[in-house]
Image (cartoon, grey):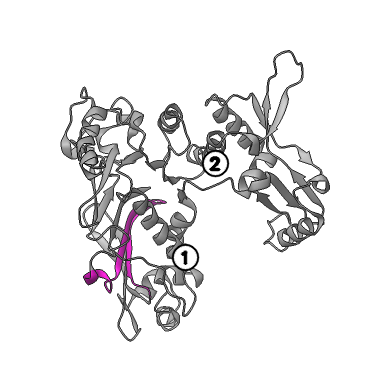
Amino acid sequence: MLIRFTVENFLSFKDEVEFSMVAGRPRKHPDHILPRKSKRDLRILKTAVIYGANASGKSNLIKAMSFARNLIVEGRSEGQYIPVSPFRFDTAYNDKPSKFQFEIKCSTASYVYGFEVDSRRVHSEWLYEIHTSRHDLIFERRTDSEDNVTLEPESLGVTIDKRTGFIPYLLDTVQSNQLFLKHGVANRVSHFYDIYDWFRKSLVLIYPDTRLSVGFGIMFKNNQDYKRRFRNIISSFDLGFSDIDLPETDLESEWRLPPEVREYVIQKIKELPRESGGNVAAYIEDLNIYIEVDKNDDVRAYKFETIHNVVGQRSPARMELTDESDGTRRVFDLVPALISLLSDDRERVCVIDELDRRLHANLSHKIIELFLAKSEQLSSQLIVTTHELQLLDLDLLRRDEVWFIEKNARGSSTAFSLEEFHPRYDKDIRKSYLQGRFGAIPLLPSRRSLELRQ
């Protein structure tokens, strides 16, 4: 689970900004707190909904998480620059490193992990294990201006790996542009596995242009329980069709794929890494074609279809997913994340940028409502950015689940919670927000001032 995220000197975040999932004082909606194993455990929220004007920095917060996650999971090759974007509207910050820090709980332990980077090197990196009354240092790494890497404590090898001389080996081989955590995982430091896997598997980021992945087709085709869950969620959104299907289709008859293009696509799919069963697959979104190649190199193609009842006709009509509305396709893009959040096999932290993109207000509300209703005993979290005012509802959310991001006249973003304003639960917070009482709204000129400027 995510406890806190901190960012500094990245995109519109000039000074250090902390986003927290730690519950505040409100006692309303106690079921919105993640399950705790003891009274000493922090009270962590399941949900956060983030508001702000256009260009306020909402998406930049998600981009900061995404940048940090990608650097942790993918790393950098020797000599590659780090694609960091420091704050641009103060020249004093051009040469300062950008800072990212996560406080997380994974498996049975909690950690603080963070780093400072510029385009050339990882200046510093740290990992602590959090206990009730103390933080235990696991490692702290520093890189000097000559690209020499040092590590504290020097006895780290004894703590996390019994092989004599292993840590000096890691220090000699880690590059100045590489994170020590990623380098350790690559060299089988098992102590780092849970932390690394939290970023690789548990933290899921969805953007406005995120589309269905090939993994969705595999699960829908081969996993009956997954198909049932998908159909159940889709049916609750009243999208105008009665069912969905993934029937096989004749790839050679697909006129949008000329023979030479079809052969090229199939060859590229065959070159992809094989699954354990020897199969490999790809989804061509623009054509709504899911192509699977088995271990014998036999090729099969499938298309997602929606099934509609037709008045006066016994058999239903079928439509390709590409013929449905943008809003319907957006729901299809989001449902796999909901299924993942509501599965009990592994905790997930799903972050959705612009939840309301192409969705009716009632659908955005339904997604939050559905997650909160079905995740009571699960350790999953849903964090979204939005402009949708229907979510500003204290019957749906707690005060500490509502966040605002605001940018000042100097282009610097800050983040703060509705809890800081202590509004009464019977107050119309939508009206108060639109009146500017919480900030984080666009400051638009009056009609009179517009007339004077003409």
> Vertically, is 156 above or below 425?
below
Label 1 or label 2, whichever lies nearer to me, is 2
Q: Position of residue 116 (x, y in %)?
A: 31, 68
Q: Position of residue 298 (x, y in %)?
A: 82, 53
Residue type at mark 1: give it.
Ser
Q: Is residue 452 left or right of residue 45?
A: left
Q: Earlier in the sequence, mark 1 or mark 2?
A: 1
Write down the residue under mark 1: 190
Write down the residue under mark 2: 333
> Vertically, is 114 above or below 220?
below
Is residue 121 at least partly visible in the picture?
yes
Question: What is the distance, in whole Å, between disc 1 and disc 2 at their CAs?
Answer: 34 Å
Q: Residue at x 53, y 38 (%)?
A: 330
Secondary structure under the numbered disc 2 in the rendered image: helix
Residue type at mark 2: give it.
Asp
Q: Is residue 101 magenta?
A: yes
Which residue is farthest bottom?
Answer: 146
Magenta residues, as a range?
Answer: 91-119
Q: Residue at x 56, y 26 (%)?
A: 239
Q: Residue at x 82, y 43 (%)?
A: 250
Is residue 109 at least partly visible in the picture?
no
Q: Position of residue 84 (x, y in %)?
A: 38, 67
Q: Which mark is residue 111?
A: none
Q: Give 144 or 195, whichever is nearer the viewer.
A: 144
User: Which picture quadrant has residue 43?
Assistant: top left
Secondary structure under the numbered disc 1 in the rendered image: helix
- Local crowd at mark 1 within 10 Å, few (<14), some, or many (≥20)? some
Q: Is residue 56 left or right of residue 366?
A: left
Q: Main secondary structure of the magenta part?
A: strand
> Vertically, is 107 above or below 450?
below
Q: Give 30 or 273, whichever is nearer the viewer.
A: 273
